[in-house]
Amino acid sequence: MSLSSTISPAPSLADQAFAALVDAISNGELEPGSRIKEAEIARNLGISRGPLREALSRLESNGLVERKTNLGVSVTSLSIEDLDDLFKMREALEGQACGLAAERMTPLDITHLEEMLERHADTTAQTGHYKQMTADDDFHFFIIEKSGSRRLFRALCNDLYQQVRMYRHRSSSNLIRSETALTEHADIIRALASGNRRKAEDAMRLHISNARENVLWVENKIE
């Protein structure tokens, strides 16, 4: 095997722009409905319009931005009905993924989740905001990955995952909901540790159902 085949290529300017915009959308810096000012963003990222437009095309295919005639590009803004549908879909699919994960989790996996939750609890206590900013530190992402289902992983961790992150940031700024979510995550870990598929699925479905109600409440207030 040649050395070149073992080294991953450096991310292109378009890749870097895509990652930066995903982060900005996920952390609320670019809110749903806000217009993408290409010249300003290109200048801030230190790149030309070409790589930026390539990144925007990828964001559009992921459902994170949308183009409107004569209005340019803006961050996707989902209606209350779309959000309701998104979270109901997530509840069904992620509940199933959690059930599958319960049958595959090792003691080391459970320990990893417990340590992750401790970090999240510390951050929430300091900021009053439950943040999971990267896929590597995302409670749900880890469980879905451990389900062993590639189809569920693709369905939940690509377009759906990004859109959930976009709205999760706004709803998780509610301290009461953040603390409740931590408790629900602890319940999910206990269910996973039991190895009981039904118990794990029910715990995840309850958590996402509660998250859906909170997201809809927050978005209704904003509207």
Image: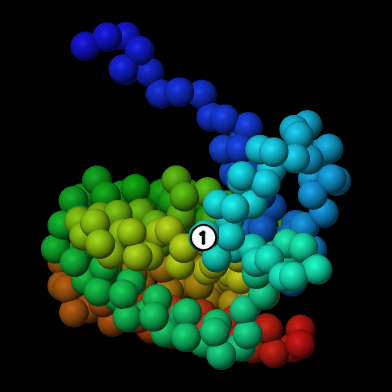
Q: Position of residue 116 (x, y in %)?
A: 44, 51
**Residue 145 location (% of width, % of height):** 30, 54
| Of residues 85 and 204, the one drawn nearer to the viewer in this rendering | 85
In the picture, measured across the screen, residue 96 lies left or right of residue 179, that is: left
SS at mark 1 in the image: loop
Q: Amino acid at mark 1?
A: Asn
User: In the rendered picture of this protein, how many numbered marks are placed on residues?
Assistant: 1
- Residue at 52% of width from left, 69% of height from top? 164
Q: Quadrant of residue 213?
A: bottom right
**In-front residue for pair 221/10:** 10
Residue at 46%, 80% (x, y): give it.
87
10 Å crowding of disc 1: few (<14), some (14-19), many (20+): some
The vertical placement of 222 against 17, above or below, is below
Vertical position of residue 172 compared to residue 206: above or below: above
Left of 139 or right of it: where is 96?
left
Q: For residue 45, what is the image quadrant?
A: top right
> In terms of image quadrants, where is residue 157?
bottom left
On-image quarter of the C terminus:
bottom right
Residue closest to the eye, 143 or 33: 33
Residue at image point 28% right, 64% down: 152
Looking at the picture, the colour scheme in use is rainbow
Q: Which residue is at 58% across, 60% downward? A: 60
Query: In which quadrant will I find the N terminus?
Result: top left
Q: Position of residue 83 (x, y in %)?
A: 55, 82
Give the percent coordinates (x, y) of residue 117.
Answer: 45, 56
Q: Is residue 188 above or below residue 89?
A: above
Residue 193 seen from this side: no
Residue 145 appearing in the image: yes
User: Where is mark 1, residue-wise?
Assistant: 62
